[in-house]
Image: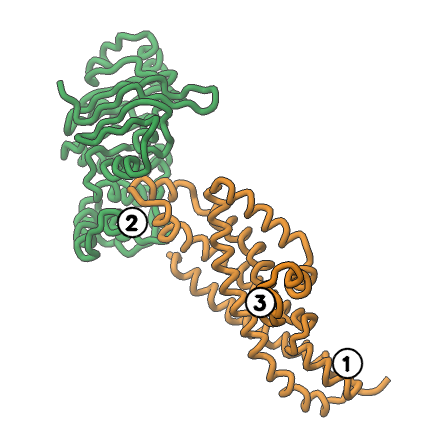
Chain colours: A green, B orange
Protein backbone atom coordinates (compact mmCIF):
# COMPACT_ATOMS: atom_id res chain seq x y z
CA UNK A 1 0.00 0.00 0.00
CA UNK A 2 1.60 3.25 -1.08
CA UNK A 3 0.85 6.47 0.72
CA UNK A 4 0.15 9.70 -1.12
CA UNK A 5 0.61 11.47 2.16
CA UNK A 6 2.86 9.82 4.70
CA UNK A 7 3.48 11.01 8.24
CA UNK A 8 6.18 9.20 10.21
CA UNK A 9 7.11 9.67 13.87
CA UNK A 10 5.68 13.15 14.15
CA UNK A 11 6.58 14.54 17.56
CA UNK A 12 5.82 17.86 19.19
CA UNK A 13 6.70 19.07 22.67
CA UNK A 14 5.65 22.25 24.40
CA UNK A 15 8.28 22.56 27.11
CA UNK A 16 8.29 19.35 29.11
CA UNK A 17 4.89 18.38 27.77
CA UNK A 18 4.87 15.94 24.85
CA UNK A 19 1.75 16.79 22.86
CA UNK A 20 2.40 14.52 19.89
CA UNK A 21 4.24 11.34 20.64
CA UNK A 22 5.37 9.75 17.40
CA UNK A 23 2.34 9.93 15.13
CA UNK A 24 2.33 7.64 12.07
CA UNK A 25 -0.40 8.19 9.52
CA UNK A 26 -0.79 7.29 5.86
CA UNK A 27 -3.38 8.79 3.53
CA UNK A 28 -4.35 7.47 0.09
CA UNK A 29 -5.22 9.98 -2.63
CA UNK A 30 -8.83 11.11 -2.15
CA UNK A 31 -9.06 9.58 1.27
CA UNK A 32 -11.11 11.39 3.93
CA UNK A 33 -9.90 10.86 7.46
CA UNK A 34 -11.58 12.17 10.59
CA UNK A 35 -9.67 12.54 13.83
CA UNK A 36 -11.65 12.22 17.04
CA UNK A 37 -10.71 12.07 20.69
CA UNK A 38 -10.90 13.92 24.00
CA UNK A 39 -9.92 17.60 24.22
CA UNK A 40 -6.24 18.33 24.71
CA UNK A 41 -4.97 15.14 23.13
CA UNK A 42 -3.09 16.84 20.32
CA UNK A 43 -5.63 16.56 17.49
CA UNK A 44 -5.39 20.22 16.52
CA UNK A 45 -1.65 20.27 17.12
CA UNK A 46 -1.30 17.39 14.67
CA UNK A 47 -3.01 19.42 11.93
CA UNK A 48 -1.04 22.53 12.83
CA UNK A 49 2.24 20.61 12.68
CA UNK A 50 1.41 19.31 9.21
CA UNK A 51 1.25 22.94 8.07
CA UNK A 52 4.12 24.11 10.31
CA UNK A 53 1.85 26.58 12.09
CA UNK A 54 3.38 24.76 15.02
CA UNK A 55 6.86 23.53 14.29
CA UNK A 56 7.21 19.80 14.96
CA UNK A 57 10.30 18.67 16.86
CA UNK A 58 10.79 15.44 14.94
CA UNK A 59 9.25 13.31 12.23
CA UNK A 60 9.15 13.03 8.47
CA UNK A 61 6.33 14.34 6.28
CA UNK A 62 5.89 13.14 2.73
CA UNK A 63 3.43 14.75 0.31
CA UNK A 64 3.77 13.23 -3.16
CA UNK A 65 7.35 13.93 -4.21
CA UNK A 66 7.99 16.41 -1.40
CA UNK A 67 9.71 15.02 1.68
CA UNK A 68 10.34 17.22 4.71
CA UNK A 69 12.36 16.21 7.74
CA UNK A 70 10.70 18.22 10.50
CA UNK A 71 13.82 18.57 12.62
CA UNK A 72 15.75 20.34 9.88
CA UNK A 73 13.07 21.79 7.59
CA UNK A 74 14.26 24.82 5.64
CA UNK A 75 12.13 27.90 5.10
CA UNK A 76 11.74 26.93 1.43
CA UNK A 77 10.52 23.44 2.36
CA UNK A 78 8.00 24.87 4.81
CA UNK A 79 6.63 27.22 2.14
CA UNK A 80 6.48 24.35 -0.36
CA UNK A 81 4.56 22.24 2.14
CA UNK A 82 2.14 25.06 2.90
CA UNK A 83 1.54 25.61 -0.78
CA UNK A 84 0.37 22.03 -1.16
CA UNK A 85 -1.93 22.05 1.84
CA UNK A 86 -4.93 24.16 2.73
CA UNK A 87 -6.08 24.94 6.24
CA UNK A 88 -9.57 25.66 7.52
CA UNK A 89 -9.53 27.33 10.94
CA UNK A 90 -11.95 26.98 13.80
CA UNK A 91 -12.37 30.76 14.00
CA UNK A 92 -12.22 31.29 10.20
CA UNK A 93 -9.06 33.44 10.08
CA UNK A 94 -10.49 35.59 7.31
CA UNK A 95 -8.49 38.63 6.25
CA UNK A 96 -10.55 41.49 7.69
CA UNK A 97 -9.18 44.07 5.24
CA UNK A 98 -10.15 41.98 2.20
CA UNK A 99 -13.53 41.26 0.67
CA UNK A 100 -14.84 37.71 0.46
CA UNK A 101 -13.63 37.51 -3.15
CA UNK A 102 -10.21 38.92 -2.25
CA UNK A 103 -9.92 36.38 0.56
CA UNK A 104 -10.18 33.70 -2.13
CA UNK A 105 -7.88 35.36 -4.69
CA UNK A 106 -5.14 36.38 -2.25
CA UNK A 107 -3.42 32.99 -2.22
CA UNK A 108 -3.76 32.59 -5.99
CA UNK A 109 -2.31 35.96 -7.04
CA UNK A 110 0.21 36.60 -4.28
CA UNK A 111 1.44 33.08 -3.64
CA UNK A 112 0.83 31.26 -6.92
CA UNK A 113 1.41 34.22 -9.22
CA UNK A 114 -1.89 33.92 -11.11
CA UNK A 115 -3.17 36.94 -13.05
CA UNK A 116 -5.89 38.93 -11.31
CA UNK A 117 -8.42 38.04 -14.01
CA UNK A 118 -7.77 34.31 -13.76
CA UNK A 119 -7.89 34.37 -9.97
CA UNK A 120 -11.13 36.33 -9.94
CA UNK A 121 -12.77 33.94 -12.37
CA UNK A 122 -11.76 31.05 -10.11
CA UNK A 123 -12.97 32.94 -7.03
CA UNK A 124 -16.36 33.58 -8.63
CA UNK A 125 -16.70 29.87 -9.45
CA UNK A 126 -16.04 29.04 -5.82
CA UNK A 127 -18.28 31.78 -4.46
CA UNK A 128 -21.08 30.17 -6.47
CA UNK A 129 -20.22 26.73 -5.05
CA UNK A 130 -20.28 27.98 -1.48
CA UNK A 131 -23.54 29.80 -2.10
CA UNK A 132 -22.14 33.31 -1.77
CA UNK A 133 -22.14 34.43 -5.41
CA UNK A 134 -23.81 37.70 -4.41
CA UNK A 135 -21.54 38.44 -1.43
CA UNK A 136 -18.18 38.60 -3.19
CA UNK A 137 -17.74 42.30 -2.42
CA UNK A 138 -18.68 41.99 1.25
CA UNK A 139 -16.11 42.34 3.99
CA UNK A 140 -16.00 39.54 6.58
CA UNK A 141 -17.40 41.84 9.29
CA UNK A 142 -20.69 42.01 7.41
CA UNK A 143 -21.10 38.24 6.98
CA UNK A 144 -22.74 35.82 9.39
CA UNK A 145 -20.61 33.23 11.18
CA UNK A 146 -21.77 30.51 8.81
CA UNK A 147 -21.02 32.67 5.78
CA UNK A 148 -17.59 33.55 7.14
CA UNK A 149 -16.69 29.92 7.65
CA UNK A 150 -17.94 29.12 4.12
CA UNK A 151 -15.53 31.78 2.85
CA UNK A 152 -12.81 30.20 5.01
CA UNK A 153 -13.52 26.85 3.37
CA UNK A 154 -13.75 28.53 -0.04
CA UNK A 155 -10.30 29.99 0.46
CA UNK A 156 -8.98 26.50 1.10
CA UNK A 157 -10.87 25.14 -1.94
CA UNK A 158 -9.40 27.81 -4.19
CA UNK A 159 -5.91 26.54 -3.49
CA UNK A 160 -6.75 23.13 -4.98
CA UNK A 161 -4.46 21.58 -2.39
CA UNK A 162 -3.21 18.00 -2.22
CA UNK A 163 -4.42 17.90 1.35
CA UNK A 164 -7.11 19.92 3.09
CA UNK A 165 -6.78 20.25 6.86
CA UNK A 166 -9.94 21.19 8.76
CA UNK A 167 -9.50 22.09 12.41
CA UNK A 168 -12.86 21.81 14.19
CA UNK A 169 -14.54 23.85 11.46
CA UNK A 170 -17.92 24.08 13.21
CA UNK A 171 -16.86 24.45 16.86
CA UNK A 172 -16.95 28.27 16.92
CA UNK A 173 -20.29 28.48 15.10
CA UNK A 174 -23.68 29.27 16.56
CA UNK A 175 -25.81 26.13 16.27
CA UNK A 176 -27.96 27.72 13.55
CA UNK A 177 -24.97 27.90 11.15
CA UNK A 178 -23.52 24.43 11.75
CA UNK A 179 -25.75 22.70 9.22
CA UNK A 180 -24.82 24.83 6.22
CA UNK A 181 -21.10 24.47 6.94
CA UNK A 182 -21.33 20.70 7.37
CA UNK A 183 -23.28 20.50 4.10
CA UNK A 184 -20.48 22.33 2.31
CA UNK A 185 -17.79 20.08 3.77
CA UNK A 186 -19.86 17.05 2.82
CA UNK A 187 -19.94 18.25 -0.79
CA UNK A 188 -16.18 18.76 -0.83
CA UNK A 189 -15.72 15.30 0.62
CA UNK A 190 -17.98 13.90 -2.10
CA UNK A 191 -15.56 15.42 -4.62
CA UNK A 192 -12.89 13.12 -3.16
CA UNK A 193 -10.71 15.91 -1.84
CA UNK A 194 -8.05 14.31 0.36
CA UNK A 195 -8.84 15.65 3.79
CA UNK A 196 -7.93 15.38 7.41
CA UNK A 197 -10.63 16.75 9.67
CA UNK A 198 -10.66 17.20 13.41
CA UNK A 199 -14.25 17.25 14.58
CA UNK A 200 -16.51 16.77 17.55
CA UNK A 201 -19.47 16.00 15.29
CA UNK A 202 -19.44 12.21 15.58
CA UNK A 203 -22.41 11.58 13.33
CA UNK A 204 -20.83 13.77 10.66
CA UNK A 205 -17.45 12.03 10.96
CA UNK A 206 -19.11 8.69 10.58
CA UNK A 207 -20.95 9.87 7.48
CA UNK A 208 -18.16 11.48 5.46
CA UNK A 209 -14.98 9.73 6.56
CA UNK A 210 -13.40 6.69 4.95
CA UNK A 211 -11.45 6.19 8.13
CA UNK A 212 -11.67 7.31 11.73
CA UNK A 213 -8.58 7.94 13.81
CA UNK A 214 -9.00 7.96 17.58
CA UNK A 215 -6.32 9.90 19.45
CA UNK A 216 -5.57 10.17 23.11
CA UNK A 217 -2.52 11.44 25.01
CA UNK A 218 -0.67 12.49 21.85
CA UNK A 219 -0.90 9.04 20.26
CA UNK A 220 -3.11 7.26 17.79
CA UNK A 221 -4.91 4.68 19.88
CA UNK A 222 -6.97 3.06 17.20
CA UNK A 223 -7.97 3.62 13.58
CA UNK A 224 -10.32 1.95 11.19
CA UNK A 225 -13.44 2.31 9.05
CA UNK A 226 -16.29 4.26 10.71
CA UNK A 227 -18.47 1.16 11.05
CA UNK A 228 -15.77 -0.62 13.03
CA UNK A 229 -14.70 2.31 15.24
CA UNK A 230 -18.23 3.34 16.11
CA UNK A 231 -19.77 -0.16 16.04
CA UNK A 232 -17.03 -2.33 17.44
CA UNK A 233 -14.24 -0.27 19.04
CA UNK A 234 -11.37 -2.54 20.13
CA UNK A 235 -9.57 -0.34 22.63
CA UNK A 236 -11.05 0.32 26.06
CA UNK A 237 -10.14 4.03 25.77
CA UNK A 238 -12.04 4.35 22.49
CA UNK A 239 -15.04 2.66 24.04
CA UNK A 240 -14.90 4.95 27.08
CA UNK A 241 -14.66 8.07 24.89
CA UNK A 242 -17.54 7.06 22.63
CA UNK A 243 -19.69 6.26 25.65
CA UNK A 244 -18.97 9.74 27.04
CA UNK A 245 -19.87 11.60 23.85
CA UNK A 246 -22.95 9.45 23.43
CA UNK B 1 -2.13 97.18 33.09
CA UNK B 2 -2.01 98.29 29.46
CA UNK B 3 -4.49 97.06 26.84
CA UNK B 4 -3.40 94.53 24.17
CA UNK B 5 -1.99 96.32 21.15
CA UNK B 6 -4.13 94.63 18.52
CA UNK B 7 -2.75 96.85 15.76
CA UNK B 8 0.77 95.65 16.54
CA UNK B 9 -0.42 92.05 16.54
CA UNK B 10 -2.03 92.49 13.14
CA UNK B 11 1.22 93.91 11.83
CA UNK B 12 3.26 91.12 13.34
CA UNK B 13 1.05 88.21 12.26
CA UNK B 14 2.09 88.12 8.58
CA UNK B 15 5.76 88.39 9.54
CA UNK B 16 5.57 85.41 11.86
CA UNK B 17 3.22 83.48 9.60
CA UNK B 18 5.96 83.72 6.98
CA UNK B 19 7.82 81.11 9.03
CA UNK B 20 4.94 78.61 8.93
CA UNK B 21 6.38 76.88 5.83
CA UNK B 22 9.66 76.26 7.70
CA UNK B 23 7.75 74.81 10.66
CA UNK B 24 5.66 72.56 8.42
CA UNK B 25 8.71 71.52 6.40
CA UNK B 26 10.54 70.37 9.52
CA UNK B 27 7.46 68.59 10.86
CA UNK B 28 6.55 66.86 7.59
CA UNK B 29 10.08 65.61 6.85
CA UNK B 30 10.56 64.42 10.42
CA UNK B 31 7.11 62.78 10.41
CA UNK B 32 7.72 60.81 7.21
CA UNK B 33 11.16 59.69 8.39
CA UNK B 34 9.78 58.82 11.82
CA UNK B 35 6.93 56.77 10.32
CA UNK B 36 9.31 54.66 8.24
CA UNK B 37 11.72 54.22 11.14
CA UNK B 38 8.90 53.45 13.59
CA UNK B 39 7.41 50.78 11.29
CA UNK B 40 10.82 49.10 11.03
CA UNK B 41 11.38 49.28 14.79
CA UNK B 42 7.91 47.88 15.44
CA UNK B 43 8.45 44.98 13.02
CA UNK B 44 11.78 44.12 14.64
CA UNK B 45 10.06 44.01 18.02
CA UNK B 46 7.01 42.05 16.87
CA UNK B 47 9.06 39.43 15.03
CA UNK B 48 11.56 39.36 17.93
CA UNK B 49 14.51 39.53 15.54
CA UNK B 50 17.48 38.22 17.56
CA UNK B 51 19.99 40.85 18.82
CA UNK B 52 18.28 43.69 16.91
CA UNK B 53 15.27 43.28 19.19
CA UNK B 54 17.42 44.08 22.26
CA UNK B 55 19.02 47.08 20.56
CA UNK B 56 15.66 48.45 19.51
CA UNK B 57 14.32 48.04 23.04
CA UNK B 58 17.22 50.15 24.37
CA UNK B 59 16.75 52.74 21.61
CA UNK B 60 13.05 53.12 22.39
CA UNK B 61 13.69 53.23 26.12
CA UNK B 62 16.32 55.98 25.74
CA UNK B 63 14.35 58.22 23.42
CA UNK B 64 11.20 57.90 25.49
CA UNK B 65 13.06 58.24 28.75
CA UNK B 66 14.90 61.50 28.12
CA UNK B 67 13.57 64.99 27.32
CA UNK B 68 13.40 66.05 23.69
CA UNK B 69 15.25 69.24 24.53
CA UNK B 70 18.16 67.29 25.99
CA UNK B 71 18.23 65.05 22.89
CA UNK B 72 18.31 68.08 20.59
CA UNK B 73 21.20 69.60 22.54
CA UNK B 74 23.05 66.27 22.35
CA UNK B 75 22.73 66.24 18.56
CA UNK B 76 23.49 69.88 17.99
CA UNK B 77 26.09 70.74 20.61
CA UNK B 78 27.32 67.40 21.97
CA UNK B 79 27.88 64.91 19.19
CA UNK B 80 29.77 67.26 16.80
CA UNK B 81 32.53 67.39 19.45
CA UNK B 82 33.23 63.69 19.09
CA UNK B 83 31.81 62.81 15.66
CA UNK B 84 33.73 64.87 13.07
CA UNK B 85 31.21 64.51 10.19
CA UNK B 86 28.60 66.20 12.37
CA UNK B 87 30.66 69.36 12.81
CA UNK B 88 28.86 72.30 11.31
CA UNK B 89 25.49 70.55 11.30
CA UNK B 90 22.86 73.25 10.95
CA UNK B 91 20.08 73.74 13.45
CA UNK B 92 17.29 72.74 11.08
CA UNK B 93 18.95 69.41 10.24
CA UNK B 94 19.71 68.70 13.88
CA UNK B 95 16.10 69.48 14.82
CA UNK B 96 14.75 67.19 12.08
CA UNK B 97 17.03 64.35 13.18
CA UNK B 98 16.14 64.84 16.82
CA UNK B 99 12.40 64.99 16.17
CA UNK B 100 12.60 61.92 13.94
CA UNK B 101 14.39 59.76 16.50
CA UNK B 102 12.35 61.01 19.44
CA UNK B 103 8.96 60.53 17.85
CA UNK B 104 9.86 57.27 16.10
CA UNK B 105 10.37 55.73 19.55
CA UNK B 106 6.84 56.66 20.62
CA UNK B 107 5.28 55.80 17.27
CA UNK B 108 7.02 52.41 17.18
CA UNK B 109 5.24 51.44 20.37
CA UNK B 110 1.82 52.40 19.08
CA UNK B 111 2.43 50.67 15.74
CA UNK B 112 3.62 47.59 17.62
CA UNK B 113 0.44 47.61 19.68
CA UNK B 114 -1.66 47.94 16.53
CA UNK B 115 0.19 45.06 14.85
CA UNK B 116 -0.37 42.83 17.86
CA UNK B 117 -4.03 43.86 17.75
CA UNK B 118 -4.48 42.09 14.40
CA UNK B 119 -6.12 38.78 15.24
CA UNK B 120 -3.55 35.99 15.45
CA UNK B 121 -5.68 33.73 13.26
CA UNK B 122 -5.16 36.12 10.32
CA UNK B 123 -1.38 35.71 10.64
CA UNK B 124 -1.81 31.95 10.69
CA UNK B 125 -4.22 31.98 7.77
CA UNK B 126 -1.75 34.02 5.72
CA UNK B 127 1.05 31.63 6.64
CA UNK B 128 -1.12 28.62 5.89
CA UNK B 129 -1.72 29.72 2.29
CA UNK B 130 2.04 30.01 1.83
CA UNK B 131 2.64 33.74 2.19
CA UNK B 132 6.10 34.84 3.21
CA UNK B 133 6.59 36.95 6.32
CA UNK B 134 7.01 40.06 4.15
CA UNK B 135 3.84 39.38 2.14
CA UNK B 136 1.72 38.82 5.19
CA UNK B 137 2.96 42.00 6.87
CA UNK B 138 2.55 44.12 3.76
CA UNK B 139 -0.78 42.79 2.55
CA UNK B 140 -2.66 41.71 5.66
CA UNK B 141 -1.22 42.98 8.91
CA UNK B 142 0.17 46.47 8.23
CA UNK B 143 -2.91 47.80 6.38
CA UNK B 144 -5.05 46.88 9.39
CA UNK B 145 -2.51 48.09 11.92
CA UNK B 146 -2.22 51.44 10.14
CA UNK B 147 -5.94 51.92 10.45
CA UNK B 148 -5.86 51.18 14.17
CA UNK B 149 -2.82 53.36 14.79
CA UNK B 150 -3.91 56.29 12.59
CA UNK B 151 -5.55 58.43 15.31
CA UNK B 152 -2.56 58.04 17.64
CA UNK B 153 -0.07 58.74 14.85
CA UNK B 154 -2.00 61.85 13.90
CA UNK B 155 -1.75 63.03 17.50
CA UNK B 156 2.02 62.53 17.36
CA UNK B 157 2.14 64.60 14.19
CA UNK B 158 0.33 67.44 15.93
CA UNK B 159 2.67 67.13 18.87
CA UNK B 160 5.60 67.18 16.47
CA UNK B 161 4.47 70.42 14.83
CA UNK B 162 4.40 72.08 18.22
CA UNK B 163 7.76 70.56 19.15
CA UNK B 164 9.47 72.19 16.16
CA UNK B 165 9.40 75.34 18.26
CA UNK B 166 12.30 73.81 20.19
CA UNK B 167 14.48 74.35 17.11
CA UNK B 168 14.56 77.93 18.38
CA UNK B 169 16.96 76.75 21.08
CA UNK B 170 19.33 75.51 18.36
CA UNK B 171 19.51 79.00 16.88
CA UNK B 172 16.96 78.38 14.12
CA UNK B 173 14.85 81.41 13.29
CA UNK B 174 11.41 79.87 13.06
CA UNK B 175 8.18 81.29 14.47
CA UNK B 176 9.47 81.47 18.05
CA UNK B 177 12.79 82.88 16.97
CA UNK B 178 11.14 85.52 14.82
CA UNK B 179 8.74 86.51 17.63
CA UNK B 180 11.62 86.76 20.08
CA UNK B 181 13.53 89.08 17.73
CA UNK B 182 10.54 91.28 17.06
CA UNK B 183 9.66 91.52 20.73
CA UNK B 184 13.24 92.34 21.67
CA UNK B 185 12.85 95.52 19.64
CA UNK B 186 9.31 96.48 20.60
CA UNK B 187 9.22 95.07 24.14
CA UNK B 188 5.73 93.77 23.39
CA UNK B 189 6.41 90.18 24.44
CA UNK B 190 2.80 89.39 25.25
CA UNK B 191 1.58 90.37 21.78
CA UNK B 192 4.46 88.62 20.00
CA UNK B 193 4.11 85.29 21.76
CA UNK B 194 0.33 85.48 21.63
CA UNK B 195 0.59 85.71 17.85
CA UNK B 196 2.81 82.61 17.87
CA UNK B 197 0.34 80.74 20.07
CA UNK B 198 -2.61 81.68 17.87
CA UNK B 199 -0.84 80.57 14.70
CA UNK B 200 0.07 77.18 16.23
CA UNK B 201 -3.49 76.82 17.46
CA UNK B 202 -4.88 77.56 14.00
CA UNK B 203 -2.58 74.98 12.38
CA UNK B 204 -3.48 72.30 14.91
CA UNK B 205 -7.22 73.00 14.66
CA UNK B 206 -7.06 72.75 10.86
CA UNK B 207 -5.28 69.41 11.16
CA UNK B 208 -7.78 68.11 13.69
CA UNK B 209 -10.58 68.68 11.22
CA UNK B 210 -8.57 66.78 8.60
CA UNK B 211 -7.93 64.02 11.12
CA UNK B 212 -11.63 63.52 11.80
CA UNK B 213 -12.34 63.30 8.07
CA UNK B 214 -9.49 60.84 7.52
CA UNK B 215 -10.71 58.59 10.33
CA UNK B 216 -14.21 58.60 8.94
CA UNK B 217 -12.81 57.52 5.59
CA UNK B 218 -10.60 54.78 7.00
CA UNK B 219 -13.53 53.51 9.04
CA UNK B 220 -15.72 53.24 5.96
CA UNK B 221 -13.39 50.76 4.25
CA UNK B 222 -14.43 47.97 6.60
CA UNK B 223 -17.92 49.16 7.35
CA UNK B 224 -20.87 46.95 6.61
Whether residue B114 is situated above or below residue A86 in the rendered picture? below
Judging by the rendered image, the residue that carries numbered circle 3 is: B96
From the viewer's perspective, is A133 left or right of B170?
left
Residue count near mark 2 (Cα–Cα under 10 Å), binned few <14, some 14–19, many ≥20: many
The chain letter under disc 2 is A
Residue appearing at x 58%, y 69% in the figure = B93
Question: Which residue is identified by label 2?
Answer: A103
> Between marks 3 and 2, how big is the CA–CA gap?
41 Å
Residue at (43, 44) in percent of width and height = B119
What is the chain letter for disc 1?
B
Kind of element beneath mark 2: helix
Q: Decide: is B77 above or below A127.
A: below
Image quadrant containing the N terminus of chain B: bottom right
Residue B190: assigned label: 1
Q: Is residue A116 left or right of residue B18?
A: left
> Left or right: B68 with respect to B146?
right
Instruction: State the residue in front, A55 or A212.
Output: A55
Amino acid sequence: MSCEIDIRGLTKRFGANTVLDGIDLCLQPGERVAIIGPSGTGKSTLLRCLNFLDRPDAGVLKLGDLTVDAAKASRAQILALRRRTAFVFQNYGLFANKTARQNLTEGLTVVRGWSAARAEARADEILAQIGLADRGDSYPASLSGGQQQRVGIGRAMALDADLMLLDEPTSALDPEWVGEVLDLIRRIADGRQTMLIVTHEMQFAREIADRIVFMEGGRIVEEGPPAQIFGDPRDARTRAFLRRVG
Amino acid sequence: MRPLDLGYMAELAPVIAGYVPLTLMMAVIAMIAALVLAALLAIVRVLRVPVLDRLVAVFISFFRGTPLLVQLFLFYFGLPQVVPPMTGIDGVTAAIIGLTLHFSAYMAESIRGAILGVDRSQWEAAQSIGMTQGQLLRRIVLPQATRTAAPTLMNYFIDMIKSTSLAFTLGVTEMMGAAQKEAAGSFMYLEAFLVVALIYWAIVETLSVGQRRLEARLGRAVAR
